[in-house]
Amino acid sequence: MTTKPPPVTAKDIGNGFKAFLADERFTAFVNYGLLMFTVMTFGLSAMVALLVANFVEDKAPDWLKGHYTFQKRTFWYAIGPVLLTAVAYTFVQRHAIASPVINVVVLGLVLASLGYTVGRAIMGFNHLLHSRPVPNATTWLV
């Protein structure tokens, strides 16, 4: 005869949340979340993630340092297209060029940057969720 597990109480949920906050992976999880919003916040959330990764990396275990390196490199790979898009948009507005081709190119840059950044963040998040190091933190590819 099987017995039922005890019901989950609010105290159990609170203890689980406290354990999650005390987990050494917590800041890396938050950083991956910030990196997912890089394009939508024009790079501001990624700058916060970069600062946090720089400050926390020294105290992290070796397997987690790879995640912070991966996050820092994701920032630098993502901020380039964001800045290029801002410059292109400013140029188009300043010179009153209303070409649909230029608008499509700028939109393509934004979408490509978004897909690349979110893809890297999701891949790193998945490795972190399973407590695995990033296989190659210095790669350009997702």
Image: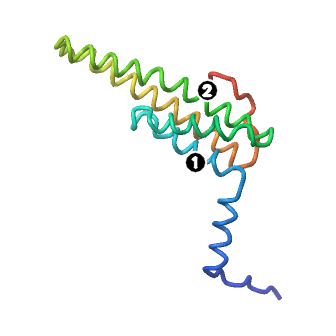
- Residue at the extreme right of the image, as rendered: 1
Q: How many marks?
A: 2
Q: CA distance from mark 2 to mark 1?
A: 16 Å
Give how far across and how far down residue 29 sits, in percent: 62, 48
Give how far across and how far down residue 93 sits, in percent: 21, 18
Q: Amino acid at mark 2?
A: Arg
Task: Indicate the quadrant where residue 23 lies.
Answer: bottom right
Give how far across and how far down residue 72 sits, in percent: 61, 30
Q: Which residue is mark 1?
A: 30
Residue plotted at (29% across, 20% down) = 89
Quadrant containing the C terminus is top right
**CB contact under 8 Å: marks 2 and 1:** no
Q: Is residue 37 above or below residue 81?
A: below
Residue plotted at (55% across, 24% down) = 76
Residue plotted at (47% across, 20% down) = 80
Q: Which residue is mark 2?
A: 73
Q: Residues within 10 Å of mark 1 (few under 14, many from 20)?
A: few
